[in-house]
Image (cartoon, grey):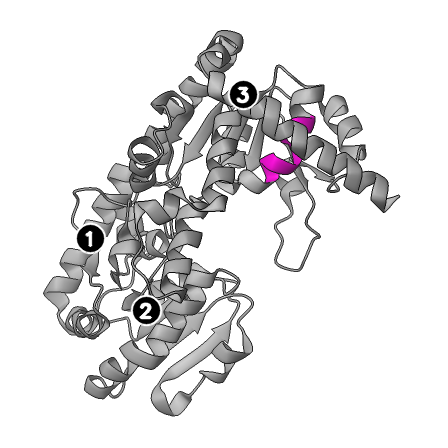
Amino acid sequence: MLQLIHLFLEQGWKVAFATVSQKNPNSIDLTQFGVKEESIELNNASFDKKIKELNPSIVVFDRFMTEEQFGWRVSEHCPNVLKILDTEDLHCLRKTRHEAIKQETEFSNDLLLNSDIAKREIASIYRCDVSLIISSYEMKILKEVFQVPQTLLYHLPFLLEEVDEIKEKSWKTFEERNHFISIGNFIHAPNLDATIQLKKVVWPIIREQLSEAELHIYGAYPTQQVLEFHNPKEGFFVHGFIEEANKVIGNSRILLAPLRFGAGIKGKLTDAMLNGTPSTTTTIGAEGMCENLGWNGFIEDDFIRFAERAIELYLNIELWNQAQKKGIEIINQWYSKEKLSIGFLNTIKAVFSNLEQYRNQNFTGKMFAHHSLQSSKYMSKWIEEKNK
């Protein structure tokens, strides 16, 4: 979302950011960039007045739950606004995979198609004019499994600055780096599960062969269970939130991400590439991130093999340097802000300039808007009255 905000500001557009969330010490002050911050409430008509006053040309919904809450209000008071859904990742994919893990069953497309959250999320995609899909794998799922028309989807991964020679030369070398790192917000269930796998399976194998190595875990909101994993004698360190994530990633030799479920693009893995740090992850970790390019390290789903590969990468300078180069190639080919921005901006301008005709091609979306949002609208109004 922050990358999108910066992109819009660079076009000279005025940007307002409205949220129901409360500020906390880790919140970014968007006003420093010239963004107008707005506080809004769920199930409250005060939003109607606010959206009419703002009178936007474009509204971006941060995930489908936001569109469910506010989409009907936007459509009712600003019917000609271009509605963009930023999916972040496919929540139905992540949630269904998580359920399969908990139930010790195999994930399948049938599970996905029958999940309630999938029905909600796909309906939200149809109700919007353009949905931003961050992963190439998720583009495939939407088109082939859910049969969503290509015209409603736009593949837009992270918008990152390319790695040039100056950036590359600023990185610490193999010899200057030490230890392993894992990083991620612990409110996010895949990160919590990955840390448990590190503690119980992966790290004991690595530590047995690399007795002086350490694993440093970073991430906001660690649970009590994660805090209790801290054990310097085992070389297992839990630090919690870190202000300068790039610094600790750039000081580490290997990033570990044993993700068993999840969706979207993993920021920790692109951050590793941007700091010249090779990684060992799983198929789900690397999913939709680099297509046919080689990974900047290893991809292993068996955690014993995962640990062995991580050790190999940690000790072998030639392998490590090759992996680092692959990371540069992935960033520069797949995540170049300069290259990606042009196509995206041209697409939304084209849709906006011919919005009525464009919407007439999406009858399913009109149908969902008529039926689904009527129920959301009157449920919201009922809650609003109840809260008075």
Residue 244 drawn at (x, y percent): 48, 62
Image quadrant holding the C terminus, namely top right
State the CA–CA distance, disc 2 to disc 3.
Answer: 52 Å
Q: Are marks 1 and 3 in contact (CB under 8 Å)?
A: no
Q: Residue at x 66, y 34 (%)?
A: 376
Mark 2 / mark 3, whichever is N-terminal:
2
Up the image or down, 371 lies above or below 385; here it is above
Disc 2 designates what residue? 252
Q: Is residue 150 left or right of residue 220?
A: left
Q: Can you see residue 186?
A: yes
Please tell me the numbered disc located at residue 353.
Answer: none
Q: Residue beneath label 1, please?
A: 295
Q: Which amino acid is tagged 3?
A: Met
Q: Earlier in the sequence, mark 2 or mark 1?
A: 2
Q: Which residues are magenta?
A: 66-73
Image location (x, y in percent) of residue 368: 54, 25
Q: Main secondary structure of the magenta part?
A: helix
Labelled pair 2, 1 in contact (Cβ < 8 Å): no
In percent of width and height, residue 202 lies at 28, 76
